[in-house]
Image (cartoon, coloured by chain):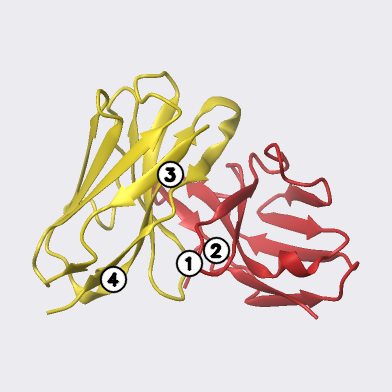
Amino acid sequence: QSVLTQPPSASGTPGQRVIISCSGSRSNLGNRYVYWYQQLPGMAPKLLIYANDQRPSGVPDRLSGSKSGTSAYLAINGLRSEDEADYYCTSWDDSLSTWVFGGGTKLIVL
Amino acid sequence: QITLKESGPTLVKPTQTLTLTCSFSGFSLSTSGLAVGWIRQPPGKAPEWLALIYWNDDKPYSPSLKSRLTVTKDTSKNEVVLRLTNMDPVDTATYYCAHYQTANHKGFDFWGPGTKVTVSS
């Protein structure tokens, strides 16, 4: 059972908008930044969003992050086949004194 | 260009100590605000944070693994070493090291490719 809760799967057709949620608590998302990672099969996680809504250079602007209270969201606009991957949210937890991860969401492009 | 790479044994026996080395380039761990983190991912599961080592040698560890973990750095060699004692089959995972920066709250922004470790007799 992960401290951050994500839906196990999400899907969409090419061109659609998909939103992946991440639910936490006051000790993590409520007080700390959220980070989003994409993981392709057999690869290391890649940073997509840091500090809630900031994109590293090279990440397309069709990806965006937001946070409201103890929930965070990753939105992917103009879905592409190459977006098919696992997505993880993470944050520091003040009560547990550890970085916590969501269980991951497998995004399927139909 | 920041790169990291993990190296170490692919197979360890139960009760043995795992030693992994993270070799990196493109930054110095003597630079204020920088750190190297270790994260592992069991097959088919989510990542799990293990430890960080900061430029000032501060070393937060995962509370659940703190008694078994040691992380050290060799700034002159651009290396960070992780040691995990008393290995168990549940420690089977891909182990990653990652560049971490506190500036702009960028978190773990660059990762190594990972090294797969299996614990089995």
- Name the spot of residue B100 as percent of width and height, x first: 46, 36
Q: What is the chain letter for disc 3? A: B
In the rendering, what colour is chain A? red
Foreground tag (4 vs 2) = 4
Give the camera-side residue of B59 and B30.
B30
Residue type indicated by callout 2: Gly
Residue type indicated by callout 1: Ala
Q: Residues within 10 Å of mark 4 (few under 14, many from 20)?
A: many
Labelled disc at residue B92:
4
Q: Residue at x 35, y 26 (%)?
A: B29
Question: Which residue is under mark 1?
Answer: B46
> Do discs 1 and 3 share a chain?
yes
Alpha-carbon span between mark 2 and mark 3: 18 Å
Labelled disc at residue A102:
2
Residue type indicated by callout 3: Ala
> Do discs 3 and 4 share a chain?
yes
Sequence-wise, which precedes: disc 1 or disc 3?
1
